[in-house]
Amino acid sequence: MSCLLTCKEFLSWLNEYLCESTDLECKKHVEEHVNACPNCWVIFDTTKKTIQVFKGQNQTPEAVPQGVQSRLMAALQRKMATGAKPPGGCSGAGPSRPN
């Protein structure tokens, strides 16, 4: 009997699935969900294509200019100082994995 993942579980397993060393059981669960859920298929397909494009770029990423980095860090510090929570009410806890 097959156990389909929920969309939330799929998203938490996506990174693990894309890792080269992922076990076959994980791959099976992700593929079953993607084949049954058109919305997650779009996410899956787009993510895979993005990685393929990135791997095709044999370039070293450019460093972020110091001025931009300073402004970004200052904006993040201001946001943290106000006690703003991440979008979606994320608690910062890692994804849960089904058994």
Image: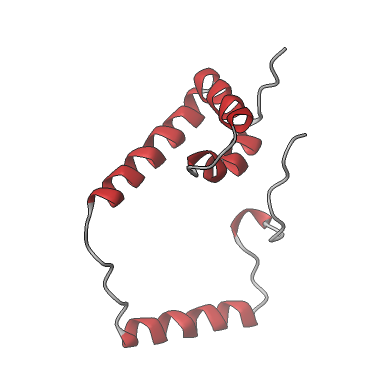
Name the foreground residue: 19 vs 49: 19
Q: Nearer the viewer, residue 89 or 7?
A: 7
- Name the residue furthest top: 1
Residue drawn at point x = 68 percent, y = 48 percent: 95
Above or below for 55 versus 98: below
Q: Is residue 35 above or below residue 71?
A: above
| Camera-side residue of 72 and 94 | 94
Answer with left or right where residue 50 lies relative to residue 18: left
Nearest the eye: 84 or 62 = 62
Left/right of residue 74 with respect to residue 33 in the rendered view = left
Return the x and y of residue 65 as percentages of the image width and height: 29, 82
Q: Is residue 75 left or right of residue 45?
A: right
Q: Position of residue 11 (x, y in %)?
A: 58, 40
Identify the coloring.
Answer: secondary structure
Which quarter of the rendering shows the C terminus?
top right
Q: Residue at x 61, y 63 (%)?
A: 86
Q: Residue at x 64, y 71 (%)?
A: 84
Height in image: 61 above or below 19?
below
Quarter occupied by residue 26 = top right
- Marks counted in the figure total 0
> Compared to 5, does 60 lie above or below?
below
Where on the picture, by quarter, is residue 43? top left
Where is residue 83? Give x, y as percent: 68, 75
